[in-house]
Image: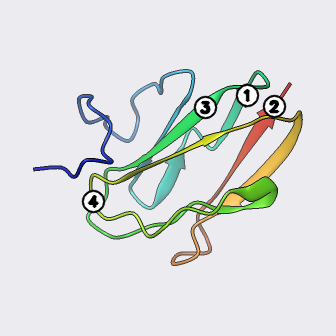
Amino acid sequence: MRGAAAVAMAPASPGAPAAANHVTIAGFAFSPSTLTVSKGTTVTWTNEDRAPHTVTGSGGLNSPTLGSGGSYTFTFKTAGTFSYYCAIHPSMHGTVVVK
């Protein structure tokens, strides 16, 4: 059973196309690794791995540790390029481009 913070949706496989405002964490990677959205968009990251992960980076991105099935949302209010990584697994990284 997933916690209250989980997003109600079918689990995505690592190679599945992501929704326009969704990033899947699976196979120790963020997918898509680069996401382009409009200013004011809320992006949701969902951890489909068994291992815990974080979304940590520029512009205020700072999730708690996300266990399996956990999710984190962030609303991008300004345009720019926002880089992020997993603080537990620093080789995992991604980017959100806000136009």
* Picture residue at 86% right of the left edge, 24% below the top: 99
> Which is more N-terminal, label 2 or label 1?
1
Q: Nearer the viewer, mark 2 or mark 3?
A: 3
Q: Is residue 92 left or right of residue 1?
A: right
Q: Are marks 1 and 2 in contact (CB under 8 Å)?
A: yes
> Which is more N-terminal, label 3 or label 2?
3
The residue pinned by badge 1 equals: 36
The residue pinned by badge 4 equals: 68
**Numbered disc 2: secondary structure:** strand
The residue pinned by badge 3 equals: 42
In the image, residue 61 sits, relative to residue 33, either above or below, namely below
Q: Residue furthest right?
A: 80
Q: Is residue 55 left or right of residue 9?
A: right
The residue pinned by badge 2 equals: 98
In the image, residue 99 sits, relative to residue 96, either above or below, namely above
Distance between mark 4 and mark 3 Cα atoms:
21 Å
In the image, residue 79 sits, relative to residue 95, either above or below, namely above
Q: Are marks 4 and 3 in contact (CB under 8 Å)?
A: no
* Picture residue at 86% right of the left edge, 35% below the top: 78
**Numbered disc 3: secondary structure:** strand
Neighbor class of circle 4 (other Cα within 10 Å; few <14, some 14-19, many 20+) is some
User: Residue 67: image x %, image y %?
Assistant: 31, 65
